[in-house]
Amino acid sequence: MSDAKQSWLAFALKTLIRSGPGALTIDRLCSRKKVTKGSFYHHFKNRQAFIDALMTYWYEQATARLIAIADTQPCPKTRLERLDEAIAATDIEAEMHIRAWALKDTSIQHHLCTIDTQRQHYLKTCYLELGLDSTQAEQLAATSYASFLGLQQLYPRLSVQECLTLSSRQAKTQLEALL
Amino acid sequence: MSDAKQSWLAFALKTLIRSGPGALTIDRLCSRKKVTKGSFYHHFKNRQAFIDALMTYWYEQATARLIAIADTQPCPKTRLERLDEAIAATDIEAEMHIRAWALKDTSIQHHLCTIDTQRQHYLKTCYLELGLDSTQAEQLAATSYASFLGLQQLYPRLSVQECLTLSSRQAKTQLEALL
DNA sequence: AAAACATACCATACAGTATGGTATTTTCAA
DNA sequence: TTGAAAATACCATACTGTATGGTATGTTTT
């Protein structure tokens, strides 16, 4: 991937985080980036190709990278803690925007589906190692992930730290009740 | 409120449920409703007034009504069960769409904030009656509500029934651990 | 020559306005 | 009480201005 293209994706992700998918029109991106459409259409075949590239870029930043960080730990309990730390140190504002975006764009839906699946699968493997059976691990993965997602969206808004604290505490209680 | 205006709001809510806020353009609504813009602008000063009316309409359907149903029960445990039943019997597809909408429209955000607050407050009163202290009740209200919201948004998608089952089971475990 | 970008243009979709038409309801005098 | 006139509710048609994705064709830089 060329530097210019990489710069386009990094800029687009920043814009998505700051202003949501509504700001990802070609015109607005170009004016904010102080280039013209000639640049955009040089690097991307059309808007859809651009969006696909952006979602792949986001997957690497906000899923693959985080799992890789957590996976440096041998103990599953420590992995989950390390994961929380990594999440706390990451700008996850794009999350909600992408989830909202998926409701009106099936291509985003597809990307998000593989990402959600992979994330839940990672949590499940941790819970399996901690002694849960397959069904329990799967359901706890779903509910703990879901409560974190949900807490992010509650009004009045909580901080990422509060979301992590509440959801991880809740997951621990749940885990102990199952063991 | 006139019948014609009521019919506009009911139609708009159906459209929102089926196709999301992107389908709530004046042109598209008019063509689907087989009327013209003259009708729209006769009943609503502008698009914003229409949206405000629609959100009020939705509040009555999906918050005030559900709470009123649950509140027919004297026991808080029964109230929560009755609430789950009422939710299961309601089309809650609008929920996610509105939450997504709120990210790009501050007026929706305001409506949703009062609604989220009222819903959490209702759950809190139930948990208070069940013996939790104020902080515990508030946090359990937040996490149980959040996990239900989050489960709705997970990919691959779950049914409303599955969301309710998982989140209410999780809330019960949490409650017993706190008592 | 190829990569990177600029400029000018097109068709479409959108919110909103101006104006007019029709049907129903209200008002007021005979 | 009643019937015509006035008001109002309801909707249609045609238009404006703006933002969008996309295309065609250049120009500059390496």
Image: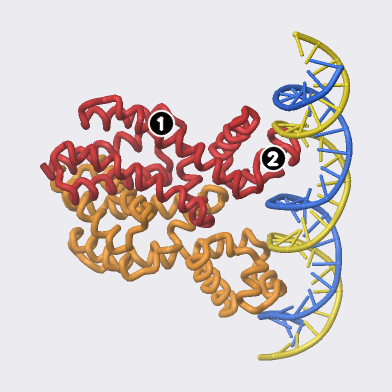
Chain colours: A orange, B red, C blue, D yellow
The part of the image, by quadrant, that contains residue B19 is: top right
- Asked if residue A179 can be seen in this view, the reply is no
The quadrant of the rendering that contains the C terminus of chain B is top left
Circle 2 crowding by C-alpha within 10 Å: few under 14, some 14–19, many from 20 = some
Which residue is labeled 1 in the image? B65
Which labelled disc corresponds to residue B40? Answer: 2
The part of the image, by quadrant, that contains residue A160 is: bottom left
Count of residue discs: 2
- Asked if residue B32 can be seen in this view, the reply is yes
Q: Earlier in the sequence, mark 1 or mark 2?
A: 2
Circle 1 crowding by C-alpha within 10 Å: few under 14, some 14–19, many from 20 = some
Q: Is residue B3 above or below residue B41?
A: above
Q: In the image, what residue type sits under mark 1?
A: Arg
Q: Between B119 and A151, which is closer to the camera in this rendering?
A: B119
Return the x and y of residue A108 as percentages of the image width and height: 53, 53
In contact (CB < 8 Å): disc 1 and disc 2 = no
Q: Residue at x 55, y 41 (%)?
A: B53
- Chain hosting mark 2: B
